[in-house]
Amino acid sequence: MKTHRSLYTAALIVVLSGGAVVADCQPVAGTIDATVVGGEPLNVLGNVTGDLAGATRAVVLGQKASDDGSVTLELAHNFVIFNRGSLATTDSAVWTPVPGREGVFHMSTSYTITGGTGAYDGATGELVNDGVADTTTGLVTLRYAGEVCVD
């Protein structure tokens, strides 16, 4: 009788919650060192360390310069994670000029995870980064942090 009551209680919880599956969310952090490789649209390729270790590709989908010298970018990223799959994101970045350093920008990006493959199939979540982009050398160096959720 006790077993039937436990099964009934578990089924009732699922029904009352609408059968919703709760995503398992994990904090992630690390670094990205990348290089602007050109192309149309503009591509940036890089190495990723930390929890999403592997490689990444960013595609610049649009950009808008402001009177103060800052640049707002719309991007899409693909992260290929060693032995575990991939993540896709859509992003918005702001590059702010570093005073006294021609062509060097402080960058801040917000990533929205839109899916993935392998262990990250159906992933959601948010990432942010903080770093430096040097347009004279084409090098980008940053730290990322956030949360990846998988059903």
Image: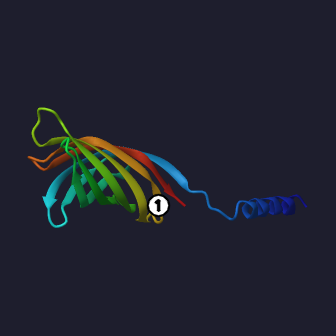
| Nearer the observer, 2 or 88 | 88
Three-letter residue code for mark 1: Ala
Above or below residue 102? Residue 1 is below
| Nearer the observer, 4 or 30 | 30
User: Picture quarter containing residue 18?
Assistant: bottom right
Q: Is residue 22 left or right of 10 when viewed as pictured?
A: left
Structural crowding at the residue carrying mark 1, measured as other residues with C-alpha within 10 Å and reported as few (<14), some (14–19) or many (≥20): many
Q: Where is residue 23 shown, x and y percent of the image? A: 56, 56
User: Picture quarter containing residue 57?
Assistant: bottom left
| Nearer the observer, 19 or 119 | 19
| Nearer the observer, 40 or 36 | 40
Where is the N terminus found, in terms of image quarters?
bottom right
Which residue is most to the top? 100
Q: Residue at x 14, y 59 (%)?
A: 37
Where is the C terminus found, in terms of image quarters?
bottom right
Query: How is this picture coloured?
Result: rainbow
Q: Is residue 40 left or right of 90 when viewed as pictured?
A: left
Q: Where is residue 63 shown, x and y percent of the image? A: 23, 56
**Under tag 1, what secondary structure?**
loop
Above or below residue 121? Residue 135 is above
Which residue is most to the right? 1
Q: Where is residue 26 shown, x and y percent of the image? A: 49, 49
Q: How many marks?
A: 1
Q: Residue at x 18, y 61 (%)?
A: 42
Residue picked out by circle 1: 123
User: Picture quarter containing residue 113?
Assistant: bottom left
Q: Is residue 84 left or right of 1 when viewed as pictured?
A: left
